[in-house]
Structure formats: structure tokens, C-alpha cells
Amino acid sequence: MNILSPSILSADFWRLGENIEAVKKAGVEWLHIDVMDGFFVPSISYGMPVIASIRKGTDMFFDVHLMIEQPERYIGDFAKSGADLINFHVEATEDVEAVIAQIRELGKKVGITIKPNTPASSVEPYLELVDMVLVMTVEPGFGGQKPIPECIGKVTEIRRMADDKGLDINIQVDGGINLDNVETAIAAGANVIVAGSAVFKDDIGENVCKFMEKM
């Protein structure tokens, strides 16, 4: 099943609740929530209080993407704030398996993420332990970038690894995905699509419908 996970980083925070209701009304079930610490990536976004606040107003699936150093320090806090899936970067911790176990112990789904310069092979040891792999198709922390073609190739490589192991896991892409290239990402093997401004700019409901038609 293909899933659209709109990134609220591109939403209008003055009208965040309205924007979330708009995507839900259009048929979206997931929300992508980017957490950036200013260290692992240059930008700073939002943290647990924002997630806990919107958790009170919706039952949507919270796909929380941690772009932070040593994510193990805050897994419990993000779980308490309402995350359904906690996704962390393999580059951000010295013990990937320990963080996976930490998330599992809290009853949450697990995702692992790789940046553009990280090879697809880096996730292979963990494929049987996670629910999703996120392939960043741009450098995290910077907006307005175009997807790097080589990253789309990594999606295909990871899908092949999963198939070879008989695993039915989600593969997510994030970075510069829009109506012009979403079909390319899906054809490569992705089934969870993160889109930001392509969803939240102008008519949200219409944008979602167009994505759904292509997915």
C-alpha cells in the first residue's frame, strides 16, 4: 500500500491545526514530523511540546523523523509526546541496534534513515528489526533542494535487499518530492512518500487528491 505522509515543516504554523485537518479530510492518514536539533543538521525545528500539542487534536499516525545527535537521549520523551513511529539516523548513534530496541520496548514502530552520502548497504543488518527505512533524497536540514538521482537508486537497492530476505517493510523517500517525480520514486520501490510544500502550498485538499491519483 502506498502512503502519503505530508511534512508539517511546510505547513503554516499560524494555522497548523487547520492544515492538519485539511490533509486528514482529503484522506491522508499519516503526518511526517521533522525534528531538527541544529547539530546533526544545521536547522532547528520543533520538539516534544509541539508534537504533544497536535497529538491532542488528531488521531493521525505520527511519523516522527529525528534529525538529532544521539537520539537515544530522547526516545522516551518522543514516545510520551505521541509518536507512533520513531525514525532515527544510523549516522547519529554509535549503537543502532540499542536504539531500535529502545523504541520497541516503548511499543512504537521503528524507522531508520540514511543521508545521501550513506550507502544503502548500511541498513542491511537492521532490515529484519525495523518497520521502515527512510532514504533521504536531499541533504537533510535544507529546503528547496532537488532529489539526488543516486538516492532514488538506493531505494531500489534497499527494496531488493528486503525482498531477498522475504521482508515486507515500508521504504520512505523524503526530499524534493512533488507531483512531477513521485511516480519515479514509487517505481523505484518506495511506498511511503513525504511531501512538504507540494502538499501545503495553495489548495491542500486539491494537492492531496493529485498525489493520490499518482500513487
Image (cartoon, rainbow, N blue to C red):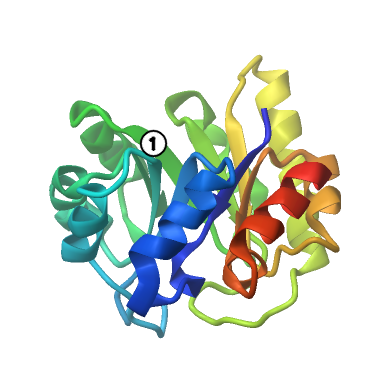
Question: Is residue 67 at all visible to an observer of this figure?
Answer: no
Residue 143 visible to an observer of this rendering? yes
How far across and down, in percent of the image, does residue 114 sit? 54, 56
- Tell me the amino acid under the disc marked 1: Val
Q: In the image, what residue occupies the spot 50% across and 23% down?
A: 128
The 10 Å Cα crowd at callout 1, few under 14, some 14 to 19, many 20 or more, is many
Q: Quadrant of the C terminus?
A: top right
Residue name at image x 21 percent, y 36 percent? 102
Q: Position of residue 182 (x, y in %)?
A: 79, 54
At 45% from the left and 64% from the top, the residue drawn is 8
Q: Position of residue 136 (x, y in %)?
A: 60, 61
In this rendering, the answer to whether 186 lies above or below 105 is below
Residue at point 43% right, 27% down?
129
Q: Quadrant of residue 62?
A: top left
Q: Quadrant of the N terminus?
A: top right
Instruction: Answer with left or right where residue 127 lies relative to residue 83.
Output: right
Q: Secondary structure at mark 1?
A: strand
Residue toward you, 58 or 174? 58
149 vs 81, nearest the viewer: 81
How many numbered marks, from 0 up?
1
Q: Is residue 23 left or right of residue 60?
A: right
Residue topped by disc 1 = 110
Q: Residue furthest top?
A: 166
Where residue 61 sits, quadrant-wise, is top left
> Could you tell me residue 148's position as x and y percent?
76, 69
User: As drawn, is 116 to the left or to the right of 148?
Assistant: left
